[in-house]
Amino acid sequence: MIMEQLQQIDHYVMQWFNELKYSLPTMLKKMDLQTKTSRFDLVTNVDKAIEQSFEQLMITKFPGHQLYGEEAHHDTQRLREGFTWVLDPIDGTANLVKQQDDFCVILALFYNSEPVLSYIYDYPRQKLFQAVKGKGVYLNGVHLPSPPTMPLEDSLISFNNKVLNDVTMHDLLDASFGYRLIGACGLDSAKVFTGQFGVHIHTNAKPWDIGAQFLFAEMLGLKMTDFHEQPIDFIYGGPFIISNPGCYEETLRILLQKGGYQK
Ligand code: IPD
Ligand code: CA
Ligand code: CA
């Protein structure tokens, strides 16, 4: 795949995000809520409409590409071959419903299983994080540098406290500067991109929660692995840490030393 082709694809995707910026307010006004597996597992017509809209873009501009999307595209048979898009149309749906804030779109393109384009669109704050392999990482079009290396004791850490064992949770709180959780994996991860957080941990990430983070981590010099320092399979997801290099080893040591977490 050549750079020109990648830039052409990026151009269409950036146009799509720009159109979404203007169509989302109307979509949000007509939002209709449904539950999936439990009363906490929410989906809205907005999630579904964004996924459909991206599928439409793909069909018209990128024929031959495949879509792996949270709401309606789960066929995993050929995803390692050619171009595959991974989409979470709304990450943080509970935040959207309960707070009308702190949600994002997570989108990534893989070519033969390698990440080549990534986006996290923080709609409420109008921040678009963009990574183009071989070119750079940008926030609203402005180059985003790698964050400085920070030790855990000076860093904010973010994790879902429901599933961590009490003792592990307190050890992590004691070792870090403090704790924050936004509750949208894409936005918690983006805070690590900018150096606002040192670490985000998700004990059971779905592939669409973390699709974009692979390329951002690679290009910003961050660590992104499972809890045994092994690469994560983009088709399956699973235990996930994204970390500033200065926090990574100590966080994993604490996470694993006393039984850690339940999935
Ligand atoms: C959720 C968010 C949340 C995480 C959940 C995810 P969704 O995504 O990323 O931060 O803790 O596990 O399911 O369902 O809002 O797309
Ligand atoms: Ca999600
Ligand atoms: Ca979602």
Image (cartoon, rainbow, N blue to C red):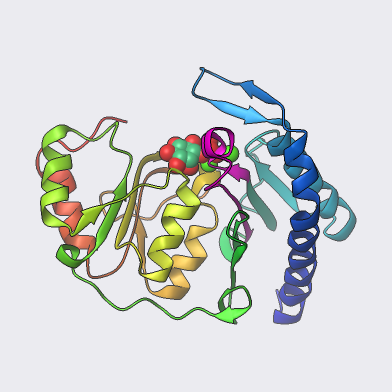
The answer to whether residue 129 of the structure is visible from this angle is yes
* Residue 74 image point, x, y percent: 65, 35
Q: Residue furthest right?
A: 60
99 is within the stretch colored magenta: yes
Q: Residue at x 48, y 61 (%)?
A: 214
Q: Is residue 41 left or right of residue 76?
A: left
Q: Quadrant of the C terminus?
A: top left
* Residue 171 image point, x, y percent: 11, 46
Q: Residue furthest top?
A: 38
Q: In this view of the protein, which residue sits in the foreground, 119 or 176? A: 176
Q: Is residue 149 left or right of residue 92?
A: left
Q: In this view of the protein, which residue sits in the foreground, 228 or 29? A: 29
Q: Is residue 98 left or right of residue 65?
A: left
Q: Residue at x 75, y 48 (%)?
A: 24
Q: Residue at x 17, y 41 (%)?
A: 169
The answer to whether residue 205 of the structure is visible from this angle is no
* Residue 16 image point, x, y percent: 78, 60
The answer to whether residue 244 is above or below residue 234 is: below
Region in magenta: 89-111
Count of numbered badges drawn on the protein: 0
Q: In the figure, residue 44 lies in which quadrant?
A: top right
* Residue 202 image point, x, y percent: 36, 44
Q: Quadrant of the N terminus?
A: bottom right
10 is within the stretch colored magenta: no
